[in-house]
Image (cartoon, rainbow, N blue to C red):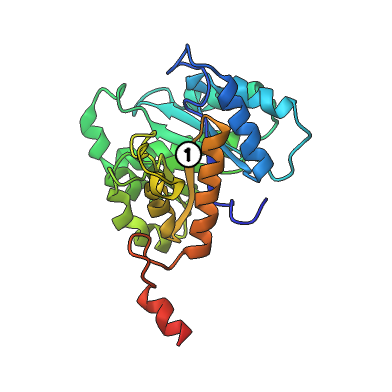
């Protein structure tokens, strides 16, 4: 992997035509993934329910095998739904569509819209059982290396951190929804990596009028500034966007420890330099 890109994950929810944007021109998105892989990105997150894995397969089939490439695959299910069936389907469908034998990690997510008893979303025992059972099913398939938990709120995050089988946690993580930042110390104490999803809030936080890429992608730099954020997942739909994101990630790695908004050196860094 190219240095500095270990923390960048290519998100695929809307990068090509799929369930959310069926009429989208897929050409730029396919070129974007190809550019990301050529730049050194080695982590891809996909969801079989969004019907965009076909494009990932198209890109991978047109390139030489990529050492170190990892796939995170989403498995969604309502609380008290058919979790075993949903997880196994996500694994089988994704492996077939992506053309892979093993999945690096299944990312368990509670389907909020289809969870009938919403009170359970605040029941840590029910949340813990969801992640524990989902992990058991995923590992029983024999095709999964790890299981992560996608958490919609503090209760789910707390429940996931208590489950030994959960290898990492993920949440929406951006300036419009920064709640997880106050839990990063707890995540670190639990010894689990943290993945920040959609740091640009699906493009809503990109300042399209800003004169420079640094200014346009300042929210991404904010997400990367904390070293406790192990990775960020960004959906990129054009080669130009990929290049700007890659450049921002590399600059963040070089400048971590500095105040991204004022340019001031962090006091701890000043002490260490003295």
Residue 148: horizontal and vertical position, in percent?
48, 43
* 59 sits left or right of 181 in the view: right
* 7 sits left or right of 101 in the view: left
Residue found at the very far right of the displayed protein:
64
SS for dot 1? strand
* 26 sits left or right of 61 in the view: left
Return the residue at label 1.
234
Count up the numbered dots: 1
Q: Is residue 80 above or below residue 152?
A: above
Q: Quadrant of the C terminus?
A: bottom left
Residue 154: horizontal and vertical position, in percent?
28, 47
Residue 204: horizontal and vertical position, in percent?
33, 34
Residue found at the very far front of the displayed protein:
211
Residue found at the very far top of the displayed protein:
23
What residue sits 49% from the left and 50% below the top? 248
Q: 90 or 251, which is in the foreground?
A: 251
- In this orientation, does residue 92 appear? no
Residue 88: horizontal and vertical position, in percent?
55, 25
What residue sits 29% from the left and 57% below the top? 182
């Amino acid at each position: 992997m190219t240095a500095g890109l270990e923390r960048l994950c290519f998100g695929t929810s809307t990068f090509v035509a799929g369930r959310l944007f069926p009429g989208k021109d897929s050409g730029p998105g396919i070129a974007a993934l190809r550019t990301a892989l050529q730049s050194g990105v080695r982590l891809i997150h996909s969801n079989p329910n969004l019907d965009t894995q076909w494009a990932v397969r198209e890109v991978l089939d047109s390139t030489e095998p990529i050492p170190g490439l990892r796939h995170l695959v989403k498995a969604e299910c309502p609380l008290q739904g058919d979790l075993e069936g949903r997880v196994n389907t996500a694994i089988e469908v994704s492996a077939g569509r992506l053309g892979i034998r093993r999945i690096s990690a299944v990312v368990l997510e509670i389907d909020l819209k289809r969870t009938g008893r919403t009170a359970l979303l605040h029941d840590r025992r029910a949340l813990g059982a969801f992640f524990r059972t989902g992990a058991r099913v995923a590992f029983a398939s024999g095709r999964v290396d790890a299981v992560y938990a996608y958490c919609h709120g503090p209760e789910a995050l707390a429940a996931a951190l208590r489950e030994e089988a959960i290898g990492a946690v993920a949440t929406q993580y951006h300036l419009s929804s920064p709640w997880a930042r106050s839990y990063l110390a707890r995540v670190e104490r639990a010894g689990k990596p943290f993945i920040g999803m959609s740091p640009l809030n699906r493009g809503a936080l990109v300042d399209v009028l800003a004169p420079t890429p640094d200014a346009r992608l300042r929210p991404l730099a904010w997400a990367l500034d904390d070293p406790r954020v192990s990775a960020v997942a960004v959906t990129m739909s054009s080669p130009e966007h990929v290049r700007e994101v890659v450049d921002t990630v590399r600059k963040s790695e070089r400048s971590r420890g500095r105040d991204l908004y004022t340019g001031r050196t962090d006091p701890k860094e000043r002490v260490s330099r003295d």
